[in-house]
Image: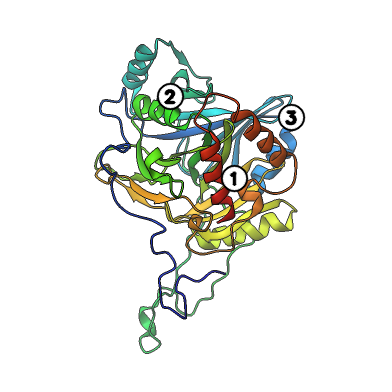
Amino acid sequence: MPTDINPRSGVDGHQNIHVDQGSLPGEHPGRARNPVIKVHDIAWLEFRKPDLVKAQAFAGAFGFSVTLRTPDELHLRGTDVGSPCVIIRKGGRSSYVGAAFLAADVADVVKLAEAADRRVDRLPDAIGGVAVSLTDPSGQAVRVVAEIDGGAQLPRQQVHALNFGVSHTAPQIAPRLNSTQRTPREPARVERLGHVVLQRTRYLENLDWYLEHLGLIVSDFLFYDGQRERGPVMSFIRCDRGETPTDHHTLAMTLGPSDRYVHSAYQVCDLDAIGAGHRYLTERGYKHSWGIGRHIQGSQIFDYWRDPDGFLVEHFSDGDLFDSSLEPGWAPMTATGLAQWGPPVSKDFLGLAPGKDALHELRSIISALHRDNEFDPERLRGLLKVASS
């Protein structure tokens, strides 16, 4: 496991990995001056999958609760009050369909619909509420919803009492006294959907669309080493709720050779839940991708898995919360900059593991270099430098 301090030099290994500073003159401000609305949260993600039986089995092992199951549809939610985290519909092949974001109220849905010249629709009774359906510049479906049926709070996983910093000379102040620590051998119970990460060939165009239409704001920008003057190539984007803190990122977006889903993340209660969930999924033969570790941007403790259809999903806990006063941070993108501690980033997580996904991405690179988009030869050199770092 990498260490933070070089024992020979005493130098902090994280120095210069993350630069907490605003943009330089002329750089992207990370927010729109006058967005149409400001969404409050991410609501759910939609997928199509050919085998709902396999999808439900993995969902149970990953820690979801099933709230709707028909021959053609599966709704998965966490323990927190809210809509399903994930909606899966039966389809001929596996695909990511799009995301739904939660508006403050119906008036915002109507306002967005009028600005985009779209209609407001009623959602199915299983979810309730209303929605406007949009399309981002990449052609991806984006819904904004309001007045959905939140459902009741479900039983949460027990958070452990931890004896941090307890002196043996004063054991009476220990949070856990005369009691052992035993983590149940069960799935890490999902609490809620945290974020989705998307790759775009026209990254800046898509970034600006989300900031202008949904009022999202950037927490952190990443740029390719030696290419800062060309602008960022990744952004971690949060909701703007003024003085009310929100997750460091609800959406993350990165430049790449194809328009695709990268991963989605689901909050669990603590590190013990992540560790026990890791063991539970391992014992059932599911494919681990990368972890356990702690990120830099967002600070989450993470653990990544592949579902039976190959989609990358993350358990996380202890993420950063920012209000609207913080300006974007800027940092170079590196593979080593993905985590403060944990195992080295895996080839599977980076999309470099041999297989059909890597072959598809290679074909996408060749295709992107012959199309009019932001992924050009200089950007490819920057990406290859990241992969080798």
| Cα separation between marks 2 and 3 | 26 Å
Residue drawn at x 57%, y 39% as measured from the top left: 262
Q: Quadrant of the C terminus?
A: bottom right
Residue placed furthest toward the bottom: 169
Q: What scheme was used to colour the molecule?
A: rainbow
Residue picked out by circle 2 = 144
Q: Report the number of discs.
A: 3
Q: Is residue 74 above or below residue 172?
A: above
Residue picked out by circle 3 = 50
> On the image, which quarter does residue 227 sit in?
top left
The residue tagged with tag 3: helix, strand or loop?
loop
Disc 2: CA contacts within 10 A as few (<14), some (14-19) or many (>=20): many
The residue tagged with tag 1: helix, strand or loop?
strand
> On the image, which quarter does residue 109 sit in?
top left
375 or 329: nearer the viewer: 375
The residue tagged with tag 2: helix, strand or loop?
strand
Residue picked out by circle 1 = 313
Disc 3: CA contacts within 10 A as few (<14), some (14-19) or many (>=20): some
Where residue 71 sits in the image (x, y, percent)? 72, 26
Where residue 258 sits in the image (x, y, percent)? 59, 32
> On the image, which quarter does residue 14 sit in?
bottom left
Q: Is residue 3 above or below residue 108?
A: below
